Amino acid sequence: MTTVLNPVGFPSKVKGKALAPRLESLDGKTIFLVDCRFDDSGLLLEQVQNWFNDHMPSVTTRIVQKNRVYAQDDPETWNQIKAEGDAAIVGVGH
């Protein structure tokens, strides 16, 4: 007798969330570039920061690294961004 198992499994239920409201302008704003500590995301964010410096010098960018690995929530970092920033770009690498 041969037993065969189906590896497909069942997807978890996911509830969608609304996107954050879009800023009217980035001029004079502080944008946090969040390194999620996943495969070269820091390198990607350095390139994004360089782009802002070259093309939108009125925008302040700050690269921050999550305190935990990419798969774990990091309330401290999110609270810092809420308190000190206007928006965030989260980099997840390749």
Image (cartoon, grey):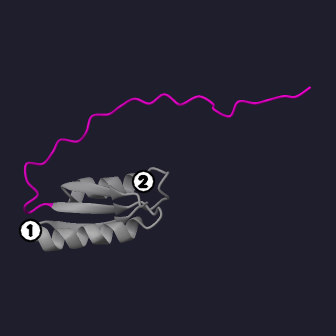
Q: Which mark is residue 84?
A: none
- Mark 2 Cα shell of 10 Å, populated few (<14), some (14-19), many (≥20): some
Give the residues drawn in magenta, as a range.
1-29
Extreme-top residue of the structure: 1
In this image, 6 relative to 23: left or right? right
- Identified at 26% across, 67% down, the residue is 48
How would you classify the magenta stretch by its main secondary structure? loop
Q: Amino acid at mark 2?
A: Asp
Compared to residue 87, the image places residue 8 above or below, namely above
- Identified at 15% across, 45% down, the residue is 22
Residue 80 picture location, percent across and down: 29, 58
Q: Amino acid at mark 1?
A: Ser
- Identified at 40% across, 64% down, the residue is 41
Residue 37 picture location, percent across and down: 45, 63
Compared to residue 54, the image places residue 18 above or below, namely above
Task: Report the residue marked by disc 2.
Answer: 74
Task: Report the residue marked by disc 1.
Answer: 58
Of the 4 image quadrants, the one containing the N terminus is top right
Of the 4 image quadrants, the one containing the C terminus is bottom left
Viewer-nearest residue: 51 or 90: 51
Viewer-nearest residue: 79 or 17: 17
Residue 7 picture location, percent across and down: 68, 34
How many numbered callouts?
2
